[in-house]
Image (cartoon, rainbow, N blue to C red):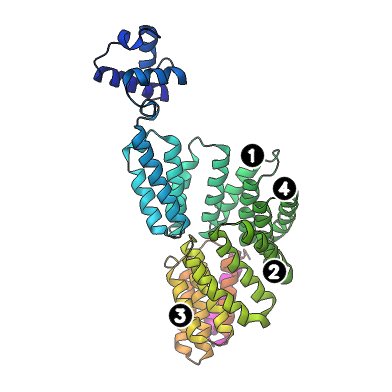
Amino acid sequence: MTTSDLVGLRIKTVRRQRGLSQAQLAHPELSDSYVSLIESGKRTPTPAVLELLAQKLDCSLSYLINGVTAEQMEDIELALGYARLALENGEVQEARTRFAELLANNNLTGLTGLRQETEFGLALATEACGELDEAISILLRLREEDQSPERRIEIAMVLCRCYKESERMTEAVEVGEQMLAGNTRQPWTDQLVELAATLLAAYVLRGDLLRARQFAAELLNAADALGTPRSIVAANWNASTVAYATGHNEEALSFAERAMAVQVETGQPRSIARLRITLLQRRLRARPAEVESVRDGLRAAVVEHEQTSTSRTDRARSHVELAFAEYMTGNYDKAVEHAVTGRSLVPEFGHVLGAEANLLLGRIYGAVGREGEASGHVASVRDWLTPLPHSRRPAAMWYATAETMEQLGDSDGAVEAYQRALACAGL
């Protein structure tokens, strides 16, 4: 049924409940034939006529338009506000439950805008809980509906990000490129720069480094032209990723520092926490002599992630990075603790972070002479990487695994891992 059909049906239902004829409802301002056309859905009443009919029927205008009373609308908006607040505060499971409960409310069915807002919130909360496949399903459903241009860009950005985190780089690139292709003749906006920055990260992880370098320069120019905090952060953050991937560690650190300086002034806690991990990672790779201060920063960052709405994947990354810093400073017990915690936060197998955590555990145990445990952890990397599509990140992990196997004396395992790395790289 169309919106006009639903409005007409509500007017007809309330009129009959009030014991009024069409002529009685119409008199004296309207004709009974006009009321008949409205009730049959053949005419769409103007806002003034709707307000008049609501007064004559002694019901709320909200009910005639949306099928819910003003009180019910207030309850829905309040529930949606609580769900958003839970997500912003890092209570991701609570947020997911609240969004899902609201979607089960029959009163939401006719409120297309609020229902779409609730579904998008559920997708974000589901992503934050680490359920990427389910988040992708919700976003794909939303993408098929009529949306505002701004919301379509938001959906594309989150969908691109979820595909990227799932190592599905082909889909991530397709989503980003399709959306940007439709906006090639429009000026850059904050939203488009953020979407493009997500696409840029997917280029890097897919191994399209030449395209990534070119696109990073384009985004930096766009951000400088816009001069807005959001665009500057997005462009510099991902330019840092490109520089890091191409071995320009000091340049990567410089871009990350610029992004962080702006983010701290204007950003949300979730974004600040995520960028802080990136900045500390870049600093550690560029200046390994500063490992102790980086480790201290990572310890604080882990706490920061627990207190914000970062996803399980983000929290896993913070623990694995801290584990690496603890390993570099010789604090092996703490390194093991954080590597295990990080591994527990990602889905079982099929995630690069799980492989990174196990490889690090293998190196830690190898460093203390526990070769059996070291070999077991390194061998288990295979289980984490095998389900993943071929891309740059799994290729790098297979190569690192091969090197570690060589150090542990597992020549056959090292050969297989090198072969896997070549296959992931398309060689």
Q: Residues within 10 Å of mark 3 (few under 14, many from 20)?
A: some
Q: Amino acid at mark 2?
A: Leu
Magenta span dominant secondary structure: helix
- Which span is picked out in magenta? 407-422
Q: Position of residue 116 (x, y in %)?
A: 45, 40
Question: In this orientation, which residue lies closer to the viewer: 360 or 275?
Answer: 275
Question: Does the residue at mark 4 contact the one at mark 3 (Cβ under 8 Å)?
Answer: no
Name the residue beneath numbered marker 2.
Answer: 253
Question: In this orientation, which residue lies closer to the viewer: 61 or 169?
Answer: 61
Name the residue beneath numbered marker 1.
Answer: 182
Q: Residue at x 62, y 56 (%)?
A: 266
Name the residue beneath numbered marker 3.
Answer: 337
Q: Position of residue 133 (x, y in %)?
A: 44, 55
Question: Does the residue at mark 2 contact the one at mark 4 (Cβ under 8 Å)?
Answer: no
Question: Does the residue at mark 2 contact the one at mark 3 (Cβ under 8 Å)?
Answer: no
Q: CA distance from mark 3 to mark 1?
A: 47 Å
**Quadrant of the snapshot with the N terminus:** top left
Q: Is residue 115 above or below residue 194?
A: above
